[in-house]
Amino acid sequence: MIVEQGHKFGRAALPVAVASAVLLAGVAGLVWVTQAKASAASSSTPITPASPVGSPPESKAALIKRYAASCELAVRERQFDKALELCREFTQFEELAGKAYSSMAVASMLSENNDVAALALSARHAEAAAKLNDALGKMIWAYHGLNGHGNAAIAPENAEVLLIEAQKDGVAKAEVLLASLRQNKECREHAQVALFELPVFCMARGELRSALTALGMREQEQSAGAEREIYSLGKMLPGARQMSLQYGKQAGSQLLVPVHVSYRFGIQEAAFASQTLQRLQDSLRKKYGAPLHAESESFGRWRSSDGVLIELKRDGSGDLLLSYRHEQRAITLQEQSLALEARRAERLSALTLKAL
């Protein structure tokens, strides 16, 4: 899927390819890529900041042409580190600042260091572009905010406003994210699983993180590109030591949504352990009905009406675990992981062959 954005500078048009986030289907899932078109006026109007002393002022058309040949070209050729350097200059020009920040957001997101820090940097650039009313920047900022990248969080209703504005201004594929928001709304209407009264499997990572923090939970650990998190529960669930979340990427939108949520109960004295187990079993039966057929290693399994498998068991260390697994998302996550491993193996084989 290619996202196109038109940047208008006047009636006359000079085709200029401006860095634009694109959702492209790949083996490991959908990734952001660059390619879009913009229009620019052929004008002799001077641009600020001023050119060096002794040289004539740079026209708008010349500035845009130089932008296309440097910042935008580096992004399209996937030279992302170079793009970050080249695009920075154009953030000083009012006419190009928004697009330059959007290009930097794309470059940061697609760089080889596509880790938590890179995503946070991309989110900051996208926010700057959105504040300058750049349509592409609004879409990328909404994407990062919904995913909670860089500790940013945008409420779904606010993200929806940004995406609708981006769509009206030419970013047609903002509809991909809008469709995901509509899907999450429909999910809430039928959700049976609600932890701490939160429909967790109907929430993207950014919204869920904000809600958990508001409840008083404290994050202990984050890893794997913000796709796994561990929270301290305090006294919110008697006997529980921590809550773990595993996220997966939603097909199409690439929004991070919960796949697996689990509570870990520390090893307790026999009497307390028995009471904890009985309390959990009674509560689960009350909420989800009679358990499925018993298994030797499990104290009970339930399947909710919205496709979540719930299991109460002990792990190898003896800790009591209560887990919630969205079965369809778990299958998708496994497929994505296998595809990613296949791509890594192919890349390593190619490097090895080249060296021999």
Image (cartoon, grey):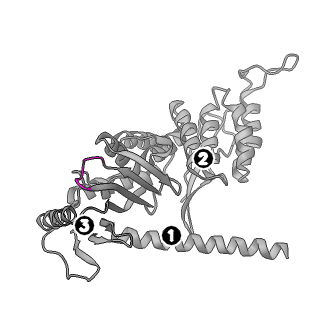
Residue 6 image point, x, y percent: 57, 42
Which residue sits furthest top? 53
Residue 124 image point, x, y percent: 55, 37
Residue on which the image places disc 3: 306
* Mark 3 residue crowding within 10 angstroms, few (<14) / some (14–19) / many (20+): some
Picture layout, residue 207 above or below residue 57: below
Residue 248 image point, x, y percent: 44, 62
In the picture, which quadrant includes the C terminus?
Answer: bottom right
Magenta residue check for 238: yes
Mark toward the start of the polypeptide (1 vs 3): 3
Secondary structure type for disc 2:
helix
Q: Is residue 257 left or right of residue 51?
A: left
What residue lies at 43% left-to-right and 54% top-to-bottom? 229
- The secondary structure that most of the magenta stretch takes on is loop
Q: Is residue 162 left or right of residue 17?
A: left
Residue on which the image places disc 1: 336
* Mark 1 residue crowding within 10 angstroms, few (<14) / some (14–19) / many (20+): some
State which quadrant residue 266 falls in. Answer: bottom left
Q: Is residue 195 left or right of residue 100?
A: left
